[in-house]
Image (cartoon, rainbow, N blue to C red):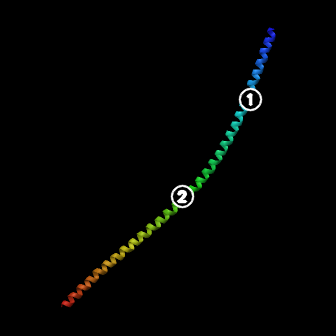
Amino acid sequence: EEMDAALLTLEEEVVSARSEAAQMVERMVGRDVAERSLVANVTHLNHQLAEVTECSRRIEAVYQQKVDELERTSAVIRSEKDNLTYRLDGIGRTLDSMVAEQDRIVSAAAEHEER
């Protein structure tokens, strides 16, 4: 009877061990599925990151071109403004000179009439 009891205990332990082993296999399979899913997600996210990075690089290049174009336009406008300012200063000096000359002519004519 001791043998039967020991044999029964051993059989119960084997059943329990097999049950635990089956549970461990299920957990390992579940972990493997989860790991494969995570790897697929990481791969997908890496692909999306590469696409976003490339898109961002292109957008940055377009904006940089616009900034460069605006800076060139601004330089042309500043140059034209400086040129016009210089020309207007010259016109102003010419007008001042003409006014002074007219004043001299008027004064000379007034002196001539007085005589």
Real-space Cα distance between discs 2 and 1? 57 Å
Residue matched to label 2 = 64
Q: Amino acid at mark 1?
A: Val
Q: Residues within 10 Å of mark 2 (few under 14, many from 20)?
A: few
Q: Secondary structure at mark 2?
A: helix
| Residue that sits furthest to the top in the current view | 1
Q: Residues within 10 Å of mark 1 (few under 14, many from 20)?
A: few
The spot of residue 93 in percent (x, y) is 33, 76
Residue matched to label 1 = 25
Q: Amino acid at mark 2?
A: Gln
The spot of residue 47 in percent (x, y) is 65, 47
Q: Is residue 76 left or right of residue 23?
A: left
Residue for point 49% across, 64% down: 72
Q: Nearer the viewer, mark 2 or mark 1?
A: 1
Q: Is residue 6 left or right of residue 106?
A: right
Is 39 placed above or below 3 here?
Answer: below
Q: Secondary structure at mark 1?
A: helix
First along the sequence among labels 2 and 1: 1
